[in-house]
Every structure is written in C-alpha cells, then in structure tokens.
Amino acid sequence: MALKMRYLELNRKVRDARMLAIQGIAEAGSGHPGASFSAAEIMGVLYFHKMKHRPSDPLWEERDYFINSKAHSAPGFYAVLSIAGYIDSKEIKTLRKLGSRLQGHPVRYSERQKNHSFPGIEYSGGSEGIGLSVSIGIALAKKRDGEKNRVYTLIGDGESNEGQIWEAAMAASKFRLDNLVAILDRNMIQQDGFTEEIMPLDPVRDKWAAFNWNVVEVNGHKIEQIIDALSRIEKVEDKPSIIIANTTKGKGIKHMANNPQWHGKAPPKKHVPILLEELQSEILIAPSIIAGEPENYEEKVRRAERAGADLIHLDIMDGKFVPTTSFFADTIKHLRKISSIPFDAHLMIEKPVNHVEDYIDAGCDIVTVHVEACNEMEFVEINKMLLKAGISPGIAINPGTPFPSWLIEHLDNIDVMIIMSVNPGFAGQKFIPESLDKMAGTVKILKSNNYKGFIEADGGIDATTLQQVFDAGARIMVAGNAVYGSPDINSNIIQLKHKANVAIETKLLELATINDMRSDWIKSRKNMLIPLARELGIEEDLHAIK
Amino acid sequence: MQLSDKNVISDMRSAYGKALVELGSDSNIVCVGADTTDSLKTKLFGDKFPNRLYNVGIAEANLVSIAAGLAIAGKVVFASTYAAFLPGRCLDQIRNAICYPFLDVKLVVSHAGLTVGPDGASHQQIEDISTMRTIPNMRVLVPSDSIAVKNLIPLMRHTPGPFFMRLARPSNSNIYEDNFDQFDIGKSNVIKDGSDITIIACGLMVSKGIDAAQTLEKEYGVSCRVIDMYSIKPIDVELVYRAAIDTGAIVTIEEHSIIGGLGSAVCEVTAENHPVPVNRMGVTDIFGESARETEIDALLSKYGLSSDHIVESVLKTRKKIKK
C-alpha cells in the first residue's frame, strides 16, 4: 500500500518541529521537552499529512479535530502548528512568557482568549484525563449529524492513571465512535519516574481491547507506521480506535532520551546550538538489498527492518544505463506487501520519464532518477508526477558528472540528492575517495541555494567511510555490502549505527569545543559518552570531571 | 408583582424537562445525563428527541467533559444530574473544560441542599453555590419555583457561555403566577416591598422568607422587604445596594452553607458599597442528615432554616442597625 506521505519532507518537518520546540523551551527556561519530543512524529503526521485542516481558515467546517489531552507536549504542539502555518516561527520565543499567546498549556482559541491563544487550538489542556471525553463529545455531535469530521486525541500513559480516561473508554465504545482515534504516547515515563513503577499500565493493549476498542500498536517514531495505522483505522466501523505509539521520551536529544529528569526541565540556553546540530545530524541507514547473496529480497527487507534500518534502498538497474540488471517495479510491488518501511528507489535506468509511473504504482516512497538520464524538461515532468503521488523526489549524480546548473531552480521540489561515491552498476564497489570533495562541493552549492532536502551517500559506505561522508554532509547512508556482505545483518546494522553515533558525537564535541563549553557539554551527557570515550578521545576530559 | 394566590404545587424538575422539550425544536440543543435522566426529567427531552439525549452512566467527570466536546462541535448542551456529584465530583472538569474556554454548557442539577431527604449528608450538596460562584465565567442561578425555571431555561439557552442552575428535589408552592415572566440574568425580584429590613432568599427558602415576613408584619409590626435572588452570579448589585440603603439591615437565607453562598455574595455587595448588618442564614458549616419526606420541614427546622428562625434572626438583626 502506497502511503503517499512524501516521507523525507515529513521527516524534515518533524525534525524542524523538534528544533523549534527546544529553542522555545530553552528561551522560556521551563517546559516539557520529554513529551514534546516523544509525540513529535505523532503530531507531525497529523498536521503535516493526515488531518483535513486549513491554517488560513482554522474554523473550516470540514476540518478534523486534534485534541491535545496530554497538553505537556505544548512546546512541540506549538512548533508543529507553526510549521503547519498557524503562527510565525519567531513567536515560539514568547513561549510561557507574560502576555504570550503560547501559554504553558494550550488554550482553546476564542475572542475572549485572543491574547492567550491563536486560531487553530481547539482545546484547553493542562488538567490530565479530560481531553478524551471532550473528544467523545465532538465525535458524537459530528457522527449524529452525519458529518465526516474525524477527531484525533493525544493521550499520555501517565495521564492514563486518571480514572476519567476509562470512563471515556467505556463511553466511546458505547457510542460506536468510529470517527474517534486516540493515540497513546507510550513513553513509559511520568513526572515521578517510570510509569510501571508509579502506576503500572500494562497490559495496556489488552485493557483497551477489553473496552471494545480497535487497538493498533506502532513504533511512535516511525512516521510510516503511524500513517499506515491511521489509514487502516479509517476502514474500521462502529468502534473507536486507539494507536498505542511506543515512544521514547526526549527522543532526538540523547541525554534527554528516556530520562525522567527531562520530563519538565529546560536545557541551558548556551547548549541550544549544539542541540540543534544534534537534531540535524540524525543519520538514516538505508540497506541496499541487491548486495550480498542474490535474490531473497523479502528476507533481506524483513531482517533489515527488524535490525533498525530506517529505509530500504532499492537499486533498479536496466542493463542499459548501467551494465547490469537488477529488479523492477513488479518485485517492489511484491515487497511492498510485507512492510511499511519507506522504500527508497534509485532508478539507474534510461529514459526514467517513461517508467516512473510503474514505480509510483509499486508503492515506492522515494524515487530518485539520475541527472545523466534525463534533461530538465523530463525531470520536471517526473517531479510533477512524484509530488502529485505524494512521493519524495530525488536526484542522483555520478562521480564524473558536474553539478548541472538547471537543478538550482528546482531544489525546493527535491527531497534528496544522491551523490554517488562509486560509478553505479555493481554491488560491492570500493568507495572513491575523491567523491568526498565532490560531496562537500555539492553541499556548498546546495546550501548557498537554500536547499532543505537530504544528502544521500551511495557507494562503498561502510564503517570506515561513514564518518567521512557524514562530515561532508550526508545524512542518508546507503549500505550494501556493509549490511548484507556477511550473514549477521543485525550486527552489521548495529555496527553502522555505532559508527553513526561516533560521527555525530565527534561533531557535537567539536562544536562544544569551538563554543568554549567542552567540559560542560561532556558533563551534561557523560553517561552517553563514557562508552565512546576512546573513539572520541575524551578519556582525560572524563577523568577530570570525575 | 404577580404572585401566585392559589396554592399551586409543582416541581422544578418537571418544569426543567418541559422547558427542554420546548427548546428541542432547535436541533442544536442536546442533553447529557448520568444515569439520572428519569429523575432529572431530561428523559422527557430524550423521549421526544432520542438522538439528542446521551446517557453516559454514572460518570460525572465524563458527563461534563463530553458536554464540553459537544459544545466545541457547536451544540448548546444541557448536562444534568444530582448536585451532590455535579459539581461535587467534577470541579476540575467544570473549571477547565467548560468555564476556561467559555463553552455553551448549561449545568442544571437537582437534589441540592438539605431537602434531598432520606439519602442523608452524602447527597446533601451545600457547597455548590460557593464553588461554582468562584470560577471565572460561570453564572449561577437558583430558581425558587417552576415558573422561574420555565423562564430561566430559555434565557440560559440564549445567553452564550456556561451556567450552573441548582434545583431542589421537593415539589413546592409556586411563588409566581403562571404567566409571570420578569426574569433576567443578573436580576432579582422584589416579592414584597418593605422598609424596616430586607430578607434576601433563594430557592426553596424564598417561600420561608415570605412566611416570615407575614408573621413579622402581623405580630411585630416589622415591615420586611423580600427579594427572590434567583441570579446569584451575576448578582443584582443595584437591588442589594438599595435594600441596604432603604432598610438598613439584611437577612439572607439559603439552603446552602453560610460560607460562600448567597449570604456571602450579598455581604460582598454591602461591604463594598454600603455596609449594614447582614445576618447570613443557612447551614452553619456542618453536614446534614437523613430525614423521611414527611420530616423535611422538621429537618430544615433542626438546621435553622424555618420561617420561625427567620423571624428570630430579623428581630435580632434589626437591633444591630446603627441609629
């Protein structure tokens, strides 16, 4: 099933929301980074993709409703609303301050509250356990009136201590509210500590099922899983649905992740530049399934996904544009059925403009064509088709090809640029070191032209080259032999993720050093850095702190 | 003043149910109940408009919050159950889900005060006027008979925002003539004029005040003004002020704690504008108890809420007037 989510753009917007939220929290000196981050993908998917809503007409009658019941995620919520177009991003700096429209907990907009809210906020949250019942009221009115509006409600696992959640659970199924979707941000942490110590919620799935809800469980940081679940839910009749989104509180900033101390604490302002860099440094691992043993693609997809791959890279080779042949759209169509993990199709084919429709139909999420295989007119045609279908468009460039200047004016419509570090056509080639300079040069051009998309490194990426291409600007790593070249796919991916981690921490440490807060930074995430001490060369720093 | 001269007995709950049915031709009106729809007479509305009465079971927090959601979706919502639990059990939801966002939810509760009868103190809500009055945006109405109910329900419906209306369980003699219609939010009615002292009452206590005034006039020659203060928030500042100036002393009586209710609201007006002696009559910071339906008058009397007690209070309070 094609999810039509323009995956990479969505991914970027969620990242931007996290960046905006942390700036707001740091500026305010208080707020809840933990919940803002655990629910970032959930709120992002709703506002950037799923919900019917109009920032220019917030009271549009056909809109879907979002009720932020666990309103602690306010900074993240405001950030998402800002990126969606409801407020200017500069306003986030007023968060929690006197006279701000961005109150500590969001306030339902009305003429009376125009100085404490803005159009688009439907519900005044803050007191836990109420929002799901309020959502029932909205859904009930809409359903009885035969309206199509849907109601999405974000609830927390700490919030689920409140008895009213379970009053609501009974009522929603009594009223058969199939237009109501609750999303549980299952981050396992509440103010005093871990949920299962404070007030155990498990078996949470069974609880909701017993209340006669349709229950779906997803990884709440996987955009594609949330979207897939939301789409499936639309077909359920006569029952409310709940998505149990397994999340990590503080996801995105390593020392905040899964740490109850960061439930409601602001980072020091001086850390913000490093935190923003960290959020921009996330690395996506994209195993390329043509590597390793021939065929057996299904198994390769499954195992990579289970091991934590972010994308599946699909090398389409036609024997003409490149000397070898791999597989085509029919294979992808088949693979699509087994997983919702984003498919990153790299078309190494002649005349891609004639074939791109097949790859759209096959359920790809990212489709990249080569600059060498199309002229500007064809590129524009391809680009239009992809965007219309909700697919992230990409462009790939070979080591020997100079950057084509006609690309510049299309950068807004390009979500990823693959910079080849081998000449394409075979798996298992050696990384061309000169391609690093090329990548750095290309990134420079792109940055100066305000390119917002991703850089993807493809060709010979492994544990030895990953950090170099990361430093050159790549954030998506195509890994063929590095994942499938030896049988233990799980360890191979873990190894790459470890290298990615080292690359990121090295970069952040450099930034901290430049900003004259090296020891302060090391101190703030000491426990994360101890296992990497040797690789980062910070053994002495750590010793000094102890 | 068109006072009822015949002894017409009616109950406020039935008046509420009938008023709802009248409003029901507007499909925007919906009703939410909590396993008490028969008792609250909202069932009358449900029988006529089955698609617009929602019974959420014994779950008052849910009742109030679902009402808020219905209002967000554009409905005018009447939510009802017993006063002991609404607001007794869901102050937070009333505050945050309804009053803070100023939603069109009208909370109409019954069985307020001591006159619930046999159920005893757990069911005798004597703090609601106080708690509801203090929440920003909330308006508080306490009608004295079914004619007041009949008139105030449409007024609430057409006045945007949250309301709390408390009704008593027992039937009572009508204060007003059938066709009397002088009611407004923030107003009150002078039931009987007088110059020596003012009795300000609400709910079932209005008739006690009238009885006391008659006794005082006949037996003691004291001319009492009697006011039915059916709107406690906003309160009729003008009329309270005039009572203070004209009569020099006030006795308030309510089937509610003397803390925070009608008496307090009156004192707030007099203290700020024209301080005069005010005696607050009501439940004196204690819990009530059970009484059979035939013992309701004895119960009220035991807790100091009879017309005899009012007579006594008036005579004492008059002595405090500074000459």
Image (cartoon, coloured by chain):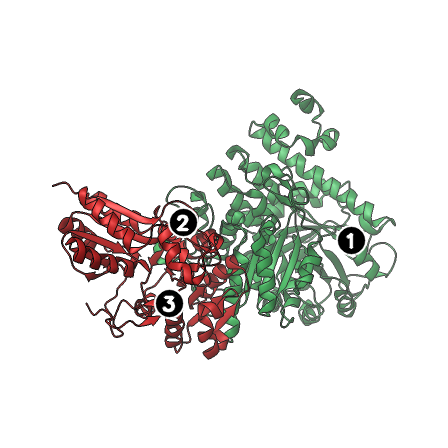
Chain colours: A green, B red
Q: Which residue is mark 1?
A: A306
Label 2 chain ID: A
Tag 2 secondary structure: loop
Q: Nearer the viewer, mark 1 or mark 2?
A: 2
- Residue at mark 1 to residue at mark 3: CA–CA distance: 70 Å
- The residue positioned 37% from the left and 67% from the top of the image is B171
**Place of residue B251 in the rendered image (x, y in percent of width and height, measured from the top left):** 24, 50
In which quadrant is the C terminus of chain A drawn? top right
Tag 1 secondary structure: helix
Label 1 chain ID: A
**Place of residue A46 in the rendered image (x, y in percent of width and height, measured from the top left):** 56, 60
First in sequence: mark 1 vs mark 2: 2
Q: Is residue B34 above or below residue A531?
A: below
**Place of residue A152 in the rendered image (x, y in percent of width and height, measured from the top left):** 56, 61
Both on one chain, marks 3 and 2? no
- Residue at mark 1 to residue at mark 2: CA–CA distance: 43 Å
In which quadrant is the N terminus of chain A drawn? bottom right
- Say what amino acid the circle numbered 1 marks: Arg
Label 3 chain ID: B
**Pick the front one: A151 or A26:** A151
Q: Which residue is mark 2?
A: A101
**Pick the front one: B3 or B273:** B3
Tag 3 secondary structure: loop
- Rendered image: mark on residue B171: 3
Q: Is residue A543 left or right of residue B113?
A: right
Residue A471, quarter of the rendered image: top right
Callout 3 crowding tier (Cα within 10 Å): few <14, some 14–19, many ≥20: some
**Pick the front one: A38 or A252:** A38
Q: Nearer the viewer, mark 1 or mark 3?
A: 3
